[in-house]
């Protein structure tokens, strides 16, 4: 009896009134108390906190995995990791200063995007994509992107054009390894005023799949100047509110990229 009273008073001194009501009902009992009156009690102390901590830990791990995936994606698209290269998890974890758990989750994200292949025998390797797959992805771009641009042009404001102009300059001056990321940012910025987030998400995934090939195309064909000119023409048509002309120029731009890749 005295032990029960002591437990109740001690608990009331460290918990809020609301939590005390739960504690007085026998839910929040310190794990150090094994039994009272010969009856074994369940060790429940901290169970609610443990659930919260687990959720927070899961969120933290997920956030870390997203950041790791972003860095690995940049390296793959930028050519640091070329197709077929084995991604050695221990080495990458050391380089990034992260544990293996969020790294494995990041690799699974990249596998879902088609950038990485994971097998029991070889572990994680950078995925290859053949010309047939690339051709299909460009076909999807031709179906989706001109349509979105046609919807977006009437809704574009000065802020959009200023950002597009800035990106053209960055694509000219930044290292070639950054080109594919900047190109993706440019195209997504063109389409965002259309307010079609689901379609834009599909386009983003397509660009991530073909990013390493766009970079290769720019390198081999010295196509940075051509891309700059075509981008500038598209912006000019958008700035003048010429939706159909902008749509036609974008279609030609994507078609040229596909043709150059096939050469």
Image (cartoon, rainbow, N blue to C red):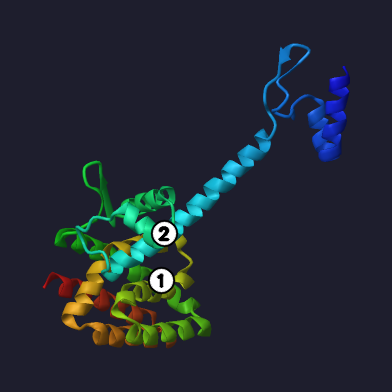
Q: Residue furthest top?
A: 38
**Eye-nearest disc, 1 or 2:** 2
**Left or right: 186 with respect to 154?**
left
Closest to the observer, 180 or 125: 125
At x 20%, y 62%, the residue is 134
**Left or right: 13 with respect to 171?**
right
Q: Give the label on residue 68, or none.
A: 2
Q: Residue 67 placed where, x, y %?
A: 45, 60
Q: Give the residue pinned by disc 1.
A: 188
Closest to the observer, 144 or 112: 112
| Residue 203, picture quadrant | bottom left
In the picture shown, does residue 148 fall above or below 245?
A: above
Q: Residue 98 placed where, x, y %?
A: 44, 56
Q: Earlier in the sequence, mark 1 or mark 2?
A: 2
Query: Dot 1, how many residues are within 10 Å of its Cα: few (below 14), some (14-19), or many (20+)?
Result: some
Closest to the observer, 49 or 193: 49
């Amino acid at each position: 009896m005295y032990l029960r009273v002591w437990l109740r008073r001690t608990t009331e001194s460290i918990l809020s009134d609301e939590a005390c009501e739960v504690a007085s009902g026998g839910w929040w009992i310190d794990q150090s108390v094994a039994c009272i009156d010969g009856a074994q009690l369940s060790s429940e102390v901290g169970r609610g906190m443990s659930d919260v901590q687990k959720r927070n830990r899961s969120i933290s791990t997920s956030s870390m995995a997203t950041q790791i995936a972003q860095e690995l994606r940049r390296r793959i698209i930028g050519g640091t990791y070329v197709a077929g290269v084995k991604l050695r998890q221990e080495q990458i974890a050391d380089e990034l200063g992260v544990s293996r758990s969020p790294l494995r989750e990041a690799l699974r994200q990249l596998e879902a995007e088609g950038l990485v292949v994971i097998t029991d025998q070889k572990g994680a390797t950078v995925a290859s994509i053949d010309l047939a797959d690339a051709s299909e992805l460009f076909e999807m771009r031709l179906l989706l992107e001109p349509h979105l641009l046609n919807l977006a042009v009437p809704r574009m404001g000065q802020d959009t054009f200023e950002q597009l102009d800035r990106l053209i300059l960055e694509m000219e001056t930044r290292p070639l390894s950054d080109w594919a990321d900047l190109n993706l940012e440019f195209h997504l910025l063109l389409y965002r005023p259309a307010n079609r987030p689901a379609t834009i998400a599909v386009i983003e995934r397509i660009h991530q799949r073909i990013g390493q090939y766009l970079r290769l195309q720019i390198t081999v064909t010295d196509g940075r100047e051509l891309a700059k000119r075509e981008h500038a023409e598209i912006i000019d048509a958008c700035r003048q509110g010429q939706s159909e002309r902008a749509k036609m120029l974008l279609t030609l731009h994507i078609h040229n990229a596909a043709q150059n890749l096939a050469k």
